[in-house]
Amino acid sequence: METELFIGGKWVPASSGSRFDVLDPASGEVIASVADGGESDAVAAVDAAAEAGPAWAATPPRVRGEALRRAWELMTERADELAKLISLENGKALVDAKGEVTYAAEFFRWFAEEAVRGAGELATAPSGANRILVTRQPVGVCVLVTPWNFPAAMATRKIGPALAAGCTVVLKPASDTPLTALAMAAILAEAGVPSGVVNVLPSRSSGKVVGRMLKDPRVRKLSFTGSTEVGRLLLAQAAEGVVNTSMELGGNAPFLVFADADLDAAIEGAMIAKMRNGGEACTAANRFYVEAPVAADFSQRLAARMSQLRVGPGTEESTQVGPLVNEDTVAKVDSLVKGALEAGAKAETGGSRPEGAGFYYPPTVLTGVAPDSAILREEIFGPVAPIVTFTGEDEAVRLANDTEYGLVAYVYTGDLARGLRVSEAIEAGMVGLNRGLVSDPAAPFGGVKQSGIGREGGHEGLLEYLESKYIAVNW
């Protein structure tokens, strides 16, 4: 494993010489020591990205795309190795880690194809006075800030379109999971991406190093995935330099089950939407709203399925649910569940933190959850499913929209007209209609309200890294 900073195509120690430990969530033990970048390292990374920028922007789109395609091939060839690394530092079960590697690599393949599709436009002005020529150019140096829950996919989802568009980047990975990001840097270098185009800066001083980069006038783009609270702070900092921003922030996804739904399909969808990555996903179903006639049946069946999941170290092949990423995360989940139970909820399975080493929390299903419980307001980020009943379509939509967030929602019904009607009425950037999984590299990913700005993936993801330039011309 590479453990130094990756700046200008070289592995270098932090200028201060400092390092920080990366822990195994299954045991709490140290698995690696990583260079701890500071503000001077951030400046060096921006220097490298700025120097490499003009040549990379001038590189033919096909050549840029071929480098990304080769990176996809390398990730695919090394899928097992990368999955073990993700599981080791993140804690997720190997089956989830392998799924992440496949998903993450697809962003490189998708944007390898999109690199040649940054087409402009040509039109005649309505007055006939001139032609309207629109060309698209790379934004410039981009700062990419990624979370710990999908350390590979969140990196490739940002690096892929940035490189396809002709931008250079500085990636600041989460300090809980820097090893995967460093592995991505090594793969991109091997794939032929020139020195300085991709720089990776692990750091425990996230606010300081990102803040320093945002003050640099050469930085023209910030793409952040993380909490809404941190996103607000970064938006304020970016505003000082009028920096282009993309924000994928918090979620509080409702999962609606109507009485006419196929309950077998709804249970399968619930297991995916809730338990993908052990519930540590911004797209995770956070609130389950089930129509009263089928609520008891759905709750019992979901609890039975959740109770059968095997909990253990993520690196073990038999594990289905690994530990949460750190102590703060498991403590928050435990606190939310305790609060719900104290307010009258019942744990159909799980409901309490086990003793022993590691950051574990058991798969949990809660019924009888009070409408004002914090667990319905806050992003759980753990394997807990709180269930609330409803009695009609209007109430279901009202409950679903009763949140400041609007990232994703899930709707299960046997009535297609109702499904489309409810999907339109729900305030969310994405809806899974009779599906428990919405993420796809070819689709625009993003939210509304406090869940973010902009889209990642799809053709829209490429446009986030391009500026439109209008040229008025006659001939």
Image (spheres, helix red, strand yellow):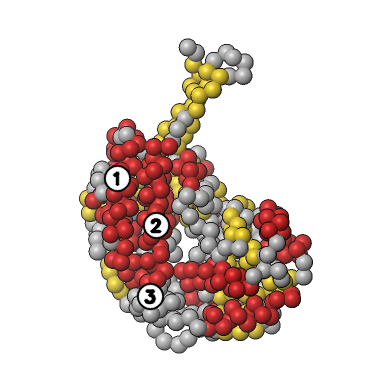
* Residue ranking furthest to the bottom: 355
SS state under label 1? helix
Query: What amino acid is labelled 3 in the image?
Result: Gly
Q: Nearer the viewer, residue 17 or 71?
A: 71
Q: Which residue is tagged 3?
A: 314
Is residue 393 shown left or right of residue 239? Answer: right
Q: Which residue is tagged 1?
A: 67
Q: Which x, y percent locates residue 310?
A: 44, 82
Q: Residue at x 43, y 77 (%)?
A: 320
The answer to which of marks 3 and 1 sits earlier in the sequence is 1
Query: What amino acid is labelled 1 in the image?
Result: Ala
Q: Which residue is tagged 2?
A: 104
Are the residues tagged 2 and 3 within 8 Å (C-beta)? Answer: no
Q: Residue at x 42, y 56 (%)?
A: 154
Q: Is residue 197 above or below residue 274?
A: above
Q: Residue at x 49, y 16 (%)?
A: 473
Is residue 353 shown left or right of residue 390? Answer: left
Q: Which x, y percent locates residue 251?
A: 57, 61
SS state under label 3? loop
The answer to which of marks 2 and 3 sits earlier in the sequence is 2
Please say whether residue 254 is visible from this viewpoint: no
Query: What amino acid is labelled 2 in the image?
Result: Ala
